[in-house]
Amino acid sequence: MIDKNLKDYINSTPASNHWEKLGIKDHHGITVPLFAIVCEKSSGIGEFLDLFEVIDFIKEIGFDTLQLLPLNETGKDPSPYNALSSLALNPLHISLHALESLDDNYELKEKLKDFKIFNTYQRVHYLKLKKLKMDFLYDYYLYVFKTLKENKEFNHFLQENSWLEEYALYRTILEEQNDKHWDIWPDDLKNLNKKNIPSLIEKYHDKMHFYFFLQYLAFSQLQSVKKYADENNIFILGDVPILISPYSCDVWFNREIFDFTYVAGAPPDSYSLYGQKWGFPLFNWKKLEENNYSWWKRRLKTIESLYHMYRIDHVVGFFRLWSIDPNSDATEGRFIPRDPTSWKKEGTKRLKMMLHSSKLLPIAEDLGLIPKIVYKTLKELGICGTKVIPWERTAFGYIKFNNYEPLSVTTISTHDSDTFEGWWETAVQYATKFAKFKRWQYSYKLSYHQRKELLYDSHHTSSIFHINLLQEYLALYPELSYPDPDDERINIPGTMLPTNWSYKYKVSFDKIKSHQKLKEDLKDLLK
C-alpha cells in the first residue's frame, strides 16, 4: 500500500509528470524476453504480435505491467544489448502470419511451413532463422512493392523517421560487405564523408527501400501492441541500453559523439571477480552537450510510440563509467570522470536531460558496485532503482521486505543472473542465511510452498513496482519449467556462450496461458 507521504514526495520531484499516466500505486508485472516465446503462429522466435497473448495473460491474473528486454536489431551476436542500431527494431520479431495480403500468395503461404521446425527446438537458432526469415521478408517485399508508393501510412512513417536513411544506408552496405564490421570496409565507406552521403543514397536507394519497409512493418506491429496494451490498461516497460556496439550504425555515422580512447566495462566485484570488458565506446559527453543531446533525444522520442516506461540499463554510467584500455584487462580499468566529486553533477544533468526529453517514466538499473550518490540522486529525481531480493543484504543480514526503498522495483532475479532456484542451489552459503532469514530449514531443493511464499513476498515489499521474470512463476510447476535451473538462465555476463540469449520457455505460451492452476496461484499473490 502506497501512503500519502510517498505520493506527495514523488509529486514534488522532477519526474512527477512522468508518473501521471501510471499512477503512484503498487504495480505488478512480469518480464518476458520476446525471443523466448513460442506461440502456435510463431516463426521460430517470439514475434511482436505474440505479445497480444501475453497482455491477455497479464490482465487475467490481475497484473498491470509487461517488461521487455531491448528489441533493437542485432548482428551475429544475438545480445539485445549489442545492437546494430539504437533505433531500428529487430526484423526477426516481425509476425509473418499477419502480413497483409499473404493469403493471396500461395507460394509465400507455403513457405511459412518452413519455420515450424524452429518452434520445436529448445533454443533459438539465430543465424539459420535469420537467413530464412530475411529471405522470406524480401520475397514478401517484392510481392507488395508496387503498392508501397500509394501506401499513405508507409510514406508517413518515412517522413516522421529521418533516421531511417542513415540506418538503411548502413544496412545495405553491411549486406554488400558480407556483414563485415564497418572498420574494415573500403576507406570511402569506412571513413564516411557526410558530403558524399547524397551520392551514396542515390547509389543504394533501391536496396535501402527494403530496410525502410522492414522497419515500417516492425514499428507498425509493435505500435499495435502498445495500442492493445492501452485498451487493456497494461503498461509496457521497454529497455534502453546506455551503450551501443562499436560496429553499429550509430557509431559509423556519428563518430564525433563517441570516445574511442577507452572501452567500457565493469569493475571487479563479488559477482564478477575479474570485472567485465564490454568493448563499447565511451561517450564524448562534451560533444553530445554541444549537439544538445540530439542523439539521446531522438532515441527517447522514437520509443514513445512503443512503450509507457523505459529501463535505463547501467544507470551508473551516467555518473561515471569503468573505462579500460582496449589492450588491457578489465581489472586495469579506471573510472571516468576520475574525480568522485563530479559524479553527482554529471549524473543529475544527464538524467534531467532524459526527463525533459520524454514524457516516459525512466526506471534505473542500479545494480553492482554503485556509489551511494547514485541512489540519492535517483530518489531526488523521482526515479525508481532496482532491488534484487537475494542481493538485498548488509553485513548484519538480509533486509526486511518492508524496509526496501519505496522508489524501486523489486525482483527475484534478472536476465544477467541465475534464477532464484539456480542461486539457491549454487550460492549455498548465502541461501542458507536467506533460509534462516525466512525461518525456513535449508534444503537443496525448493518446495512448491517456498517458491510461492517467495513470490508472494516479492509482490508485497515496500517497492512501488514488483516485476519478476516469467520463469520464476513457471518454476511452481515442473511441467512448465526445465528440471535444470541452468536451462532457465538467459545470460552469463562476460561470456560468449551459445546458451546466452537463446533461451526459450519449455512450453508454448498457449499452454502457459491455459494453465489454470498457475493462473490461480498468480492471482493469489496479490491478495
Image (spheres, rainbow, N blue to C red):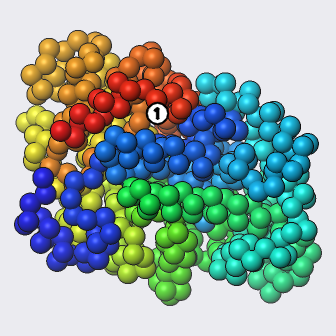
Which residue is under mark 1? 513
Q: Residue at x 38, y 81 (%)?
A: 356
Which amino acid is tagged 1?
A: Lys
- Element under disc 1: helix
Up the image or down, 7 lies above or below 331; here it is: below
> Where residue 95 sits in the image (x, y, percent)?
68, 48
Q: Quadrant of residue 85?
A: bottom right
Quarter in which the C terminus is drawn: top left
Residue found 18% across the figure and 75% down from its top: 11
Q: Is residue 337 above or below residue 231?
A: below
Query: What residue lies at 12% left-to-right and 72% top-to-bottom?
Result: 8
Q: Position of residue 301 (x, y in %)?
A: 51, 75
Image side of residue 119 versus residue 82, left or right: right
Occupied quadrant, residue 390: top left
User: Within 10 angstroms of label 1, few (less than 14), some, or many (20 or more) residues?
Assistant: some
Q: Residue 467: in sight, yes or no?
A: no
